[in-house]
Image: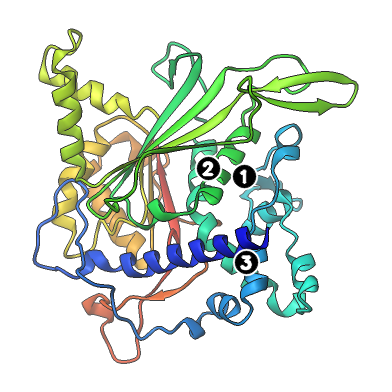
Amino acid sequence: MIRYRLISLSSTIRFEQNVHSKVFSRRRDHGKSVSLGRRHQSQSSSSSSYSADDCAHRAFAKTHPKAAADILAVPSYESLLASSSFPFTKTNDDDNKILPSSLEDYLQWRGWDIDGILHKHNLDAEVHRNSDIGLLSHPLTFPLTLGHWHVTKNSKVRDGDGGEERTDDKHTIRLCCVGARAECTLPDEFWREFLVCMATNNTSIGIGDGTYQKDFKYIIDFVGPDVPHHLKSKTITLGTTQEGGREVQEQNQSDITLPQWELTMNYHTSFLHQVVLQFLKASQSDKNASCTSKRIEKIQQYWNGGFVLFNPGLGHPHLQKGWEPTLKFLLGAGQPLLFTAHSALDANRDYELIRKILGEDDGRIDTGLLGYEVNPYASRMEFVDPFPPTSQNQEGVQHVVRPNHSYLMLH
């Protein structure tokens, strides 16, 4: 167990280093064009004056590595699957306003005993608790941000209405992560948190009433030139029995079998348009896709769960022109979209480009496209942009960014 936890810490540190080196990689080659999700690639890691000791979360991991390894050890999830779901929203007791739940809420629900771990290592919980939560926020930001979006858009299984595909007695939901980078290197145990969120938030599983849905399969296609070449497709699951389901004990109830939940992750070290062309070529033999428009429609519906763009920098002055054809394709696909941004500045620039492409007459402007919101599941790790915008490139002024700082959901 200790070895596993140290491996988890090592994997998470590598993930954090990948984030740091890739957060700014798109800003290096300012003069190169970008097409359909292209990110600028750096030949070496970005240099920055930002020291690990400047961040309390990193400093804690450096000073107390054994405690950090225990903090990063993912707790058991089995008991949650047959009990309560995590509420991504909550009601304010004062005015009954619906508010998003916090990372702290999630950690408490998941049974992350941070105070207990700190006590075990003779560390003051009042002093170090925030640092530990910040440390956990980094590997959890991608699965929780994705889970929050997926639950919010109410993407539950639908039959015969153009919703999620049903194949081989499974409900298959396919997502495309456009311009993927550091999220590809996230350790499996943290991506499994996405499945935990989905399994416990599936209202169609009638725990206690004897009604159960078929197995669920999620597929994420990570697409982008920065996707590491060595990554191979893989599938992770929640713990299953040999029969393909999970057996849980209910009070006053015999053994029941819950659906199997699995997540397959595919990696494409390519631009989005290259992947799309591959699918179009493969669909040429499809008799139901006899014309180009039908084939394009088929490709757009292929990712029936929607498209995700984590921290793309759409409106960055050196990236905007290259992102425009990608956005036109995505906005015309008729599927849900999730955008995140590194900062308020990043979000404002991205939002202006989205509005420009949608146009003022697009109905989505008036029905929910109100701007980016602060993400409760953002990473709390801070980085200083080594290539700040010209308007902020003043002495003593730094552009501080955090992965998935804010988000925009477009349906």
Give the distance between the C-alpha atoms of the residues marked 3 and 1, in whole angstroms.
27 Å
Q: Residue at x 43, y 53 (%)?
A: 407
Q: Residue at x 64, y 78 (%)?
A: 64
Q: How is the image coloured?
A: rainbow
**Disc sitting over residue 147 in the figure:** 2
Tell me the mark number nearer the camera, choosing from 3 and 2.
3
Mark 3 / mark 1, whichever is N-terminal: 3
Label 1: which secondary element: loop
Percent across and percent down for residue 292 are: 11, 20
Binning the other alpha carbons within 10 Å of mark 1 as few (below 14), some (14 to 19) or many (20 upward) gives: many
Q: Quadrant of residue 232?
A: top left
Q: Residue at x 33, y 66 (%)?
A: 23
Give the distance between the C-alpha atoms of the residues marked 3 and 2, in whole angstroms.
25 Å
Q: Amino acid at mark 2?
A: Gly
CB within 8 Å, label 1 to label 2: yes
Tell me the mark number nearer the camera, choosing from 3 and 1.
3
Q: In the drawing, does residue 199 fall left or right of residue 120?
A: left
Name the outermost residue toward the bottom.
395
Tell me the mark number nearer the camera, choosing from 1 and 2.
2
Rendered view: 286 above or below 361: above
Mark 3 / mark 2, whichever is N-terminal: 3
Q: Which residue is mark 1?
A: 88
Percent across and percent down for residue 294 are: 18, 17
| Residue 362 visible in the snapshot | yes
Q: Amino acid at mark 3?
A: Ala
Q: Which residue is mark 3?
A: 69
Which quarter of the rendered picture does the N terminus lie within?
bottom right
Q: Residue at x 18, y 60 (%)?
A: 319
Binning the other alpha carbons within 10 Å of mark 2 as few (below 14), some (14 to 19) or many (20 upward) gives: many
Binning the other alpha carbons within 10 Å of mark 3 as few (below 14), some (14 to 19) or many (20 upward) gives: many
